[in-house]
DNA sequence: GGCACTCCGTTCTTCTGCAA
DNA sequence: TTGCAGAAGAACGGAGTGCC
């Protein structure tokens, strides 16, 4: 029960973030902006008007006037400052989803209804009259109603998610997977980061800034996206998208892995190397074009790399690193040597960052790069025809779950 | 028959607990 | 601190009963 309550609460946050994404994508001009948690949950600023939207998502709750009464009173507080000349006039919008009970509210409402159901309330057995507190006349309340739009038939959660996907596909001309894993994932991160800014000026973003920020074709390890998707499901989808094929083509695959500075465990790294080697090599005698993967370990201390190589070698796990004899320089020809059943080379280790480009330049076959990074991608491919997948990880063991 | 009172189920509002 | 769901309690309204 507790866990379900938490999930429902998180769903409420997501619903609000998703609505912000929808509103940003629906802005007509690139210069138009929205503010997260401004006057209301979402403030929309267009060339002609400003609208403050209060968003409610009650997946398991029936509509009752009291549920939306408090936000309406807060909007009236703002309106009071408007008629006093302290603030600029804006439009107010209450956008809510409820499981049932929508028929209880007949729109439009009048000032009598507003006073009775939204402005009169009880707290600790004391009755309050919000309109009397603010000394507002019926005419002023009518004016407030003319600025207020109530929609308690808001889109259901999944329908809104589908709408975002459609908008992103249309905006970026991408596929559904990219819309979700690249652009929606990035969009969630951008909105989340805006929402936690203390300064309201920093919670503002224009459509063009937003589109620029989310236009990154790489997978982020974004806690909000993982919460939305579920870690296991996310890893499964990544595996299906990038690492599942019935017949693996004999391509030259580069696995570029950043070693986290904390919680490094050598056995875990070895396990990942074994997995990549096993899955992404074919050394059978019957294989016409045998192959094995290239692996580069970013930020691994020199001494640790040496220990790792010693251990692999002592376990008869055959690999090459482009150095043919003691004192020799890195040889591209050596590292590019074809792996086969006779030499049993299970993977090719690139010791240094610069060896990646030297090797890539030498190879004429189809190449693919899979980069797993911790914070920011550290290898930028300039090869137009080379597939380059960038996936953010939180820990080394994530890689094994994906590949 | 009409009115007042009581009971009880339903509806609505407010409070509380929980998680972020 | 906020926003959600659920609990608790107040308010409402219909049915039944008794009295004038």
Image (cartoon, coloured by chain):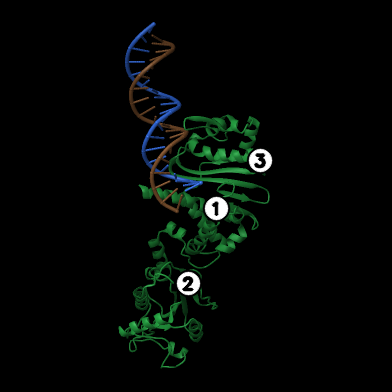
Chain colours: A green, B brown, C blue
Look at mark 2 in the image and give the residue it sits on: A389
Q: Marks 1 and 2, how far apart in space?
A: 28 Å
Circles 1 and 2 in contact, beta carbons < 8 Å = no
Percent across and percent down for residue B17 are 38, 44
Circles 3 and 2 in contact, beta carbons < 8 Å = no
Q: Residues within 10 Å of mark 3 (few under 14, many from 20)?
A: some
Secondary structure category for the residue under label 2: strand
N-terminal label among 1 and 2: 1
In the rendered image, residues at marks 1 and 2 fall on the same chain: yes
Percent across and percent down for residue A381 are 53, 77
Question: Is residue A110 at least partly visible in the picture?
Answer: no
Label 3 marks which chain's residue?
A
Residue at x 42%, y 48% (from the top left corner): A8
N-terminal label among 1 and 3: 1
Percent across and percent down for residue A291 are 39, 83
Q: Is residue A212 above or below residue A142?
A: below
Q: Residues within 10 Å of mark 2 (few under 14, many from 20)?
A: some
Q: Quadrant of the C terminus of chain A?
A: bottom left
Which label sits in the foreground, 3 or 2? 3
N-terminal label among 3 and 2: 3
Look at mark 3 in the image and give the residue it sits on: A82
């Amino acid at each position: 029960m507790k866990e379900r309550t938490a999930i429902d609460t998180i769903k409420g946050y997501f619903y609000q973030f998703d609505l912000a994404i929808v509103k940003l994508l629906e802005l007509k001009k690139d210069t138009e902006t929205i503010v997260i948690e401004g006057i209301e949950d979402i403030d929309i600023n267009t060339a002609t008007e400003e609208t403050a939207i209060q968003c409610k998502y009650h997946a398991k709750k029936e509509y009752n006037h009291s549920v939306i009464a408090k936000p309406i009173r807060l909007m009236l507080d703002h309106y009071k400052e408007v008629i006093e000349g302290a603030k600029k006039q804006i439009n107010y919008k209450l956008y809510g989803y409820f499981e049932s009970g929508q028929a209880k509210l007949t729109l439009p409402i009048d000032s009598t209804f507003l006073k009775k159901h939204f402005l009169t309330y009880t707290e600790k057995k004391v009755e309050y009259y919000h309109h009397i507190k603010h000394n507002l006349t019926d005419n002023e309340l009518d004016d407030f109603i003319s600025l207020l739009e109530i929609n308690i038939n808001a889109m259901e959660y999944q329908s809104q998610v589908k709408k975002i996907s459609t908008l992103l596909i249309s905006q970026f001309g991408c596929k559904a997977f990219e819309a979700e894993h690249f652009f929606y994932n990035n969009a969630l991160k951008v909105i989340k980061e805006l929402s936690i800014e203390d300064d309201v000026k920093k919670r503002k973003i224009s459509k063009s800034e937003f589109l620029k920020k989310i236009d990154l074709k790489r997978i982020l390890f974004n806690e909000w996206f993982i919460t939305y998707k579920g870690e296991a499901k996310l890893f499964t989808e990544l595996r299906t998208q990038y690492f599942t094929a019935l017949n693996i083509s004999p391509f030259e695959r580069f696995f570029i892995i950043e070693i986290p500075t904390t919680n490094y465990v050598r056995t875990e790294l070895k396990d990942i190397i074994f997995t990549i080697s096993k899955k992404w090599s074919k050394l059978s005698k019957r294989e016409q074009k045998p192959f094995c993967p290239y692996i580069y370990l970013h930020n691994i201390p020199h001494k640790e790399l040496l220990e790792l190589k010693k251990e692999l070698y002592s376990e008869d796990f055959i690999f090459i690193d482009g150095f043919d004899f003691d004192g020799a320089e890195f040889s591209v020809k050596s590292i590019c040597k074809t792996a086969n059943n006779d030499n049993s080379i299970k993977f090719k280790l690139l010791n240094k960052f610069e060896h990646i480009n030297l090797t890539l330049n030498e190879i004429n076959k189809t190449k693919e790069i899979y980069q797993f990074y911790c914070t920011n991608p550290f290898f930028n491919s300039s090869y137009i025809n080379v597939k380059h997948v960038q996936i953010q990880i939180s820990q080394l063991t994530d890689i094994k779950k994906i590949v």
